[in-house]
Amino acid sequence: MRTKEKIMTLPRPKKRRLINKTKFIRLAKKVNESFKEEYEYLWKKNLEYGDKIPPHSPSFS
Amino acid sequence: MEIKFLPTLLPSLKNKHLLLDTNIIRDAVKNPIVFNNFFNDLKKEHVTLSTIDHVRYEILKGSLNESKYTEKEKFLNEIIDVTIPVLPETYKLAYELIKMYGINGSGVHITDLILGAILMQYEKNIYLITRDTSDFILSIFKLPFIVNATYNKGIYSYGIYQYIK
């Protein structure tokens, strides 16, 4: 059985590092494209099957 | 877009864990420059940016192929310092939380319940940042800070929540 102390211990990062801006922006662009595709897929699927409106309706920049 | 917060925010969060909900990660995808600066401001103060697997699932699900899945994973890994494990004790606390919510819990998502249970588990050592400000009711959680992100169509408001008995 876990002790109370063990339960209350939050994990700490092994190594602290800042976000690399260039890499972050490049990845964000790609992920944004993925989210757009997923949103369009859900939109089409919901239109086709008359289901509810997709849960996320982001305004993509 | 610009992120505005009180100057007392960073000193208050110093050396604490900050749980990130799905919506702020999605917003960071759309506005990487401003969120890169915001997250790095937090990291410089030794704030440990954290999440739970349930949030990761919400971001990763729906990926068209493995390459797109990996891109999302890398994006998450850039932001997140630690993923806090959801323990059997956390699930027990989620039941307690459901009782505390009462009728207000009818529309609360499972991910939000688990995030709330994590706040209950670690109390003063952890905060949550979320744009879902209606599911973390103030009769249960404290709202010590609000972070505003202005954009061309309006303002996104993020609550910074904590659970203290």
Image: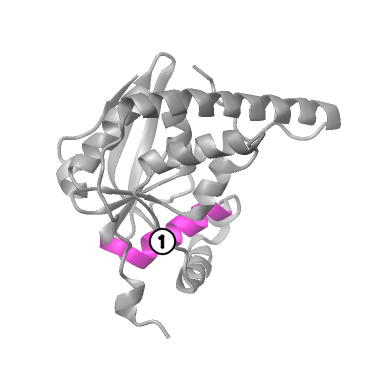
Q: Nearer the viewer, residue B77 or B13?
A: B77
Residue B124 can be seen in this image: yes
Looking at this view, name the residue that lies furthest to the top: B152
Question: The disc numbered 1 marks a residue on which chain?
Answer: B
Tell me the residue at 53%/53% (across/down).
B54
Examine the rendered structure and indicate whether residue B79 appears above or below residue A29: below
**The quarter of the displayed image where residue B123 is located:** bottom left
* The magenta stretch spans residue B16: no
Picture residue at 24% right of the left edge, 54% below the top: B16
In this rendering, the answer to whether B120 lies above or below B135 is below
Colour pattern: one colour
Taking the image as shown, residue B13 lies to the left or right of residue B139, namely left
Q: Main secondary structure of the magenta part?
A: helix
Q: Quadrant of residue A49?
A: top right
Q: Point out the stretch of residues depicted in magenta.
A: B110-124
* Tag 1 residue: B118
Percent position of residue A1, x then y: 43, 86
Residue depicted at x 66% and y 35%: B65
- Looking at the rendered structure, the kind of residue marked 1 is Ile
As drawn, the residue found furthest toward the right would be A49
- Which residue is nearer to you in this view: B63 or B135? B63
Q: Quadrant of the C terminus of chain B?
A: bottom left
Image x and y of residue B50, in percent = 37, 50
The secondary element bearing badge 1 is classed as helix
Q: Quadrant of the N terminus of chain B?
A: top left
Q: Is residue B129 left or right of residue A32?
A: left
Asked whether B159 or B34 is in front, the reply is: B34
Q: Pick out the residue farthest to the front.
A: B67
